[in-house]
Amino acid sequence: MRYWDAPIWKSDERGRAMVARDLALATRDYLRPGIEPVTGGELLGTCALWRINAQCRRAEIGYILDLRAWGLGYMHEALSALLDYAFTELNLNRIEVDTDPRNRRSTRLLEATIQSSGEP
């Protein structure tokens, strides 16, 4: 959580509140799917599209992944699927992301995901 824009959660209540909010807001304006292994059962992280603006055809993207799952391809796969959904199903033409410049792993992940997606 070093590069996240919020303090570390110190209780499960923050997570429960986030899930409740996500379920209530899940529309074409906001989407946060969970990431789990193929074997299922364990939430490894999330990726999200929010501030989706259909008229301007743009949205913002964000993600977080459990440290134990880093480097295993989960986030690349999740972001690739989310970008595909955004550009095909939602007909967006721009996705914005705000990253901490010190987070080089995240920058490399974004660059690799964009290159493999074929999107500009």
Image (tube, helix red, strand yellow):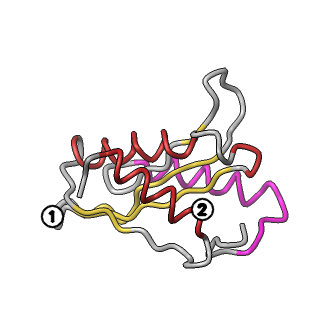
Q: In the picture, which quadrant includes the C terminus?
A: bottom left
Q: Amino acid at mark 2?
A: Arg
Percent of width and height locating residue 37: 64, 29
Residue at (15%, 64%) from the top-left corner?
55
In the image, taking residue 87 as reference, residue 27 lies left or right, namely right
Residue at (25%, 52%) from the top-left corner?
119
Q: Is residue 18 magenta?
A: yes
Front residue (pair 115, 40): 115
Task: Provide the major secondary structure of the magenta segment.
Answer: helix
Residue highlighted by disc 1: 55
Q: In the picture, which quadrant includes the N terminus?
A: bottom right
Mark sitting earlier along the chain (2/1)? 1
| Residue placed furthest toward the bottom | 101
Question: How far, Cα to Cα, is label 2 from label 1?
Answer: 32 Å
Residue at (41%, 50%) from the top-left corner?
113
Q: Is residue 62 magenta?
A: no
Percent of width and height locating residue 64: 61, 56
- Looking at the picture, does residue 36 appear above or below residue 11? above
Residue at (70%, 43%) from the top-left corner?
69
| Residue placed furthest toward the top | 39
Q: Amino acid at mark 1?
A: Gln
Residue highlighted by disc 2: 105
Asked if marks 2 and 1 touch (Cβ < 8 Å), the reply is no
In the image, taking residue 104 as reference, residue 62 lies left or right, namely left
- Secondary structure, mark 1, is loop
Q: Which residues are magenta?
A: 7-26
